[in-house]
Amino acid sequence: MKDGINQCGGSGIESVDHFDGVGIVRIRPVVNKVEIKRAKRLIVEQIPHLADIEFPKRPVEDDGTLIEGRNAVLETLRAGRAVDKVFVAEGAHIGDVAAEARRHHVPVVTCDRRKLDGMSPTGNHQGVIAQAAAQEYVSLDDIFRVAEERSEVPLIVVCDGIEDPYNLGAIIRSAETAGAHGVIIPKRRAVGLTAAVARSAAGALAYVGVHKANNLASTLDELKERGVWLFGAEADGTVGLYDAPFDRPTAIIIGSEGQGLSRLTRDKCDYIVSIPMRGRVNSLNASNAAAVLLFEALRRRTQGN
């Protein structure tokens, strides 16, 4: 006898039916972890002996930035392609890959094999996956060259530990539309030029270069030596947005989503700029803050005071 249960909306389950004591679960593709948990809970409530059911997984998108397998990763590193990180499964015997990664100053992250299983588009990663950049990085000289070719005062964006790829992509997009000459990101503890960043940048990576700094503090020192003034963005700034002298060679520095500017970065800034707020929420998303400062810099340069 059939006993249908169809009130499963938002759970990942289309229906749970009983046929003479046998439970049949119809499952649509599950799109996130919340739906997975909700669906499992509903199944256990209706058919307790199916508590360990396996749910269909959304396939990993193969966007060309994930390189799997010992030989493929090794040759990618040897060829000099821009690689942000190499993920190695615990216990994997691939010392030659790790050594080659370190020779190219690429961070090596050791993690549980299950993490690699979840990342792998093919399931044949052999214990190692390289995260290649969606776009080649540029040098600091390249950024200054762009400003020189345009006969413009340098305008640069520095991201101090941005971890969300969509934030970084949005910052790159704003930088390009505001006419910035380049973006600088740190090598460690920050997102690189992943496919998600490229999508969020909406084509801007084709027009604005991104430099990956091996040591962000040293890079900031070099910017200052080359005549660039450092403007950090924080709520408790020492100068207001409309008083900041963005008409001089400028690097706008945006801190991480959770911590803001690091102490070392803040200490190197010439100005700490605050954005005026009128509402009850006292902060902006990192990418929004970057856009506000960039377009104020553009306004200052095109219209004066």
Image (cartoon, grey):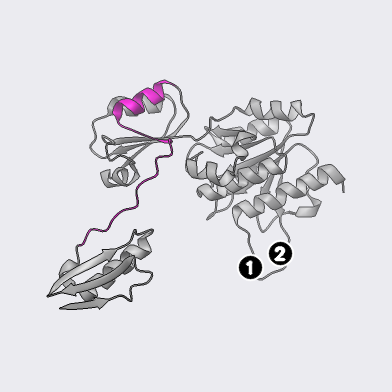
For the N terminus, give its image quadrant.
bottom left
Magenta-drawn segment: 53-79
Q: Residues within 10 Å of mark 1 (few under 14, many from 20)?
A: few
Quadrant in which residue 107 is drawn: top left
Magenta span contains residue 73: yes
Q: Is residue 134 left or right of residue 33?
A: right
Name the amino acid, label 1.
Val
The structure residue drawn at horizontal position 49% and vertical position 45%, both measured from the top left corner, is 196
Left or right: residue 172 versus residue 278 is left
Residue 299 appears in view: yes
Residue 127, compared with residue 77, is above or below; it is below
* Residue extending furthest toward the front: 1
Q: Position of residue 118 (x, y in %)?
A: 32, 47
Which residue occupies the foreground of this view, 101 or 195?
195
Q: Is residue 206 above or below residue 287?
A: above
* Secondary structure under the numbered disc 1 in the rendered image: loop
- Residue that badge 2 annotates: 277
**Image point 32% across, 68% down: which residue?**
14
- Residue 191 appears in the picture as rendered: no
Residue 123: x and y in percent read 28, 40
Residue placed farthest to the left in the image? 20
Q: Is residue 303 above or below residue 132?
A: below
Which residue was labeled with disc 1?
281
Residue 27 counted in the magenta span: no
Measured as percent of width and height from the top left, residue 155 is found at 72, 38
* Residue drawn 35% across the image and 25% down it: 74
For badge 2, the amino acid type reads: Met
